[in-house]
Amino acid sequence: VRGAVITGWGAFLPEKVVTNADLEKTMDTNDEWIRERTGIHERHVGGSTSELSIQSGRAALEMAGVDPSEIDALILATTTPDRHVPATASSVQLGLGLSCGASDLNAACSGWVYGLVNAHGLIAMGARKVLVIGTDTLDRITDYTDRNTGILFGNGSGAAVFEAVEGPGQLLGWDLDSIGEAESALYCEIGGTLEMEGREVFRRAVRIMVDSGNKSMEAAGVSPDDIKLVIPHQANIRIISAAMERIGIPEEKAMVNLHRTGNTSAASVPMALAEALDEGRVDPGDLILFVGFGAGMTAASAVVRW
Ligand code: ACO
């Protein structure tokens, strides 16, 4: 058996902050409503997807002590590429000085967890080191006059280096899901801005997170009591609370940083992972449950033994 372990991680937020008070100036909303209904206090904007990716990717490589020439594949999860063609991963490859296969992966907010699973597949087939970055610059497709969506999103990037080991590695169970019939609940046409049926997304999000998380725990042969930390997609604190309750894991075990980031789509899970690890919330041997969901509607989850 040939498994993988995470050996380095990084996160990057662009400097410019937009607070709820700032949004009150462009749309009919208020700080109290946004905090109560979403948990979000502020979000970061600015930068391009390749610029942010190069920052988080470099931090992850440095932490892992891996030379760019050693990376065998770059997976960039994003819904907001810099251009249609080529993949933004090509610009990131150039910026980081990598000499390996590089491609984008679009599974909306679940993208980085899809990337985690794909990286394990590549490593099982012989790759030695894989860099998985999740980045979104949602400010480019958000209509800041639409209070239905304009309060939710922010920019960011997170990355991790996966390295091959002899033996089973960290991944114990995983699940990838997609419900195409729900694709109209959240979409952005080419050249357009995000359109969303908020309540429909909320309702489906809770269900698909719980289903996917349960499938990963079952595949791993573990129970909710065994999980030390959940790293959920950071969309809305009420979605996280409802999903944690239904999955049967106390809410204190969920990593939450959305109050400072908003929903950063593919960046949210790797940024929350980096923060949890930097804060020392994970000890060797702990079980982490990753659960992402997003437009599609997609879901992805994984149980990892740290
Ligand atoms: N400010 C003030 N009032 C508002 C705002 C706002 N920004 N938005 C809506 N309201 C009002 C509504 O008009 C409504 O008023 P009414 O009762 O007089 O009609 C009231 O607040 C309640 O509106 P709801 O839409 O029912 O509010 P809800 O509690 O559902 O919260 C929200 C809306 C935050 C959008 C929620 O539905 C949600 O988070 N949905 C999921 C969204 C999501 O996570 N999307 C991303 C998915 S991941 C990806 O791939 C990008």
Image: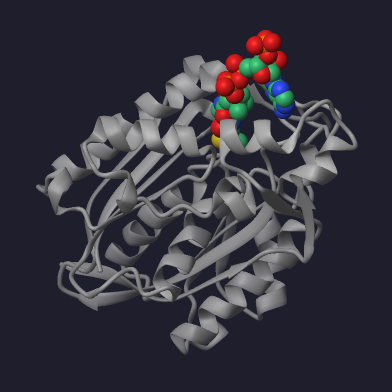
Whether residue 72 is visible to the viewer of this picture, yes or no, is yes
Q: Residue at x 67, y 73 (%)?
A: 55
Which residue is at the far left? 221
When the figure is inspected, residue 116 is found, relative to residue 25, above or below; the finding is below
Q: Residue at x 32, y 44 (%)?
A: 251
- Residue 28 lies, in percent from the top left, at 83, 25
Dividing the picture into quarters, in which one does residue 143 lie? top right
- Residue 195 lies, in percent from the top left, at 71, 23
Ligand 1 - quadrant of the structure image: top right
**In the displayed structure, does residue 28 sit left or right of residue 12?**
right
Q: Residue at x 47, y 89 (%)?
A: 65
When the figure is inspected, residue 56 is found, relative to residue 40, above or below; the finding is below
Which residue is at the far front? 32
Quarter holding the C terminus is bottom left
**In the displayed structure, does residue 304 sit left or right of residue 156?**
left
Quarter holding the N terminus is bottom left
Q: Residue at x 76, y 33 (%)?
A: 30
Dividing the picture into quarters, in which one does residue 14 lie? bottom right
Towards the viewer: 174 or 234? 234
When the figure is inspected, residue 176 is found, relative to residue 64, above or below; the finding is above
